[in-house]
Image (tube, rainbow, N blue to C red):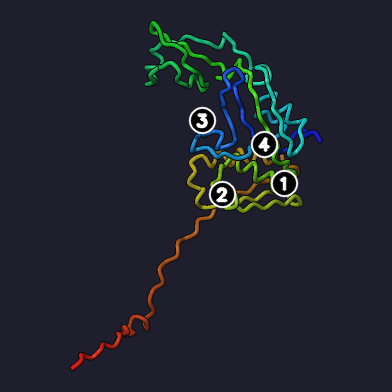
């Protein structure tokens, strides 16, 4: 049964550049280690794809729409269906002094941000820096080994999947989630250990917007944050303070 717009699915995948047989992305930790792209700060697990959301490349999303839960495929995507063709107009030469102003040392191969857009430094010559605003995989044919792990259908599964993607919790089970379609609200109790996340306020707003967009009938998202006072050590009562300490009887010395 093909998936439709706004369907939630969890997928496992490995993406390889066909021309070089180089693995560039994967949800499998062992594959990442084998390919020397393992990131200890990344969680390797099936990733959420919402059909029509456009968070994965066009060709992969089109292929996923025609797959079924549990199905596995190898998909070859030309640049037009992956990260696009290389555009020579996206190459620019910038005076090196502009980098010095921002205390950035321009080095070939380094990724920098220019006006909020990432760019790759290709060359540094004659006081000018050649930067490339093309995606690093532009012009490449990408081969995806992909499997649809699960089709998420109930609202509880969907909210948890959105929460994991936005808040990146250490343990999703630490969050208490209540959904009332009759009253049109979702309530999420955030554990105290997760409140230290400096980006949590922006993440909560983004999560609420996604819940409104993808969970039908929800009009309010409520976040609960509780801080519980630590237990104080038990104080001794007056009787306990006056009670003499018990001493063990001493053995009499033998004559």
Asked whether the residues under the numbered discs 2 and 1 touch, taking CB atoms below 8 Å apart as contact, a structural biologist would say no
Can you say whether 123 is above or below 171 in the image?
Answer: above
x, y percent for residue 219: 71, 44
- SS at badge 2: loop
Residue 37's disc number: 3
Q: Which residue is mark 1?
A: 155
x, y percent for residue 55: 65, 29
Say whether residue 9 is left or right of residue 100: right
Residue 240's disc number: none
User: At 56% across and 23% down in the image, what residue appears?
Assistant: 22
Q: Which residue is mark 2?
A: 171
Categorize mark 3 by other alpha carbons within 10 Å: few (<14), some (14-19), many (20+). Answer: some
Q: Which residue is mark 4?
A: 11
- The mark that comes first in sequence, 2 or 1, is 1
Nearer mark to the viewer, of 2 and 1: 2
Residue at mark 1 to residue at mark 3: CA–CA distance: 34 Å
The residue furthest left is 255
- SS at badge 3: loop
- Classify residue 215 by image quadrant: top right
């Amino acid at each position: 049964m093909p998936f439709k717009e706004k369907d939630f699915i969890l997928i496992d995948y490995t993406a390889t550049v066909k021309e070089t047989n180089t693995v560039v992305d994967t949800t499998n930790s062992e594959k990442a280690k084998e390919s020397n792209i393992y990131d200890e700060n990344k969680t390797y697990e099936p990733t959420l794809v919402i059909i029509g959301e456009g968070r994965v490349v066009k060709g992969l999303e089109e292929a996923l729409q025609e797959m079924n839960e549990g199905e596995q495929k190898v998909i070859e995507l030309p640049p037009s269906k992956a990260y696009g063709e290389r555009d020579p107009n996206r190459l620019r030469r910038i005076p090196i002094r502009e980098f010095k102003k921002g205390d950035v040392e321009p080095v070939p191969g380094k990724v920098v941000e220019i006006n909020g857009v990432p760019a790759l430094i290709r060359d540094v010559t004659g006081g000018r820096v050649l930067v490339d605003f093309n995606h690093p995989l532009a012009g490449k044919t990408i081969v995806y080994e992909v499997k649809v792990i699960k089709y998420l259908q109930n609202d509880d599964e969907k909210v948890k999947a959105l929460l994991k993607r936005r808040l990146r919790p250490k343990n999703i089970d630490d969050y208490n989630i209540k959904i009332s379609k009759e009253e049109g609200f979702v309530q999420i109790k955030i554990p105290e250990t997760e409140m230290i996340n400096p980006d949590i306020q922006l993440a909560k707003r983004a999560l609420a917007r996604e819940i409104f967009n993808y969970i039908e009938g929800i009009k309010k998202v409520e976040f609960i944050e509780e801080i519980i006072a630590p237990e104080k050590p038990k104080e001794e009562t007056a009787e306990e303070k006056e009670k003499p300490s018990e001493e063990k009887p001493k053995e009499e010395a033998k004559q």
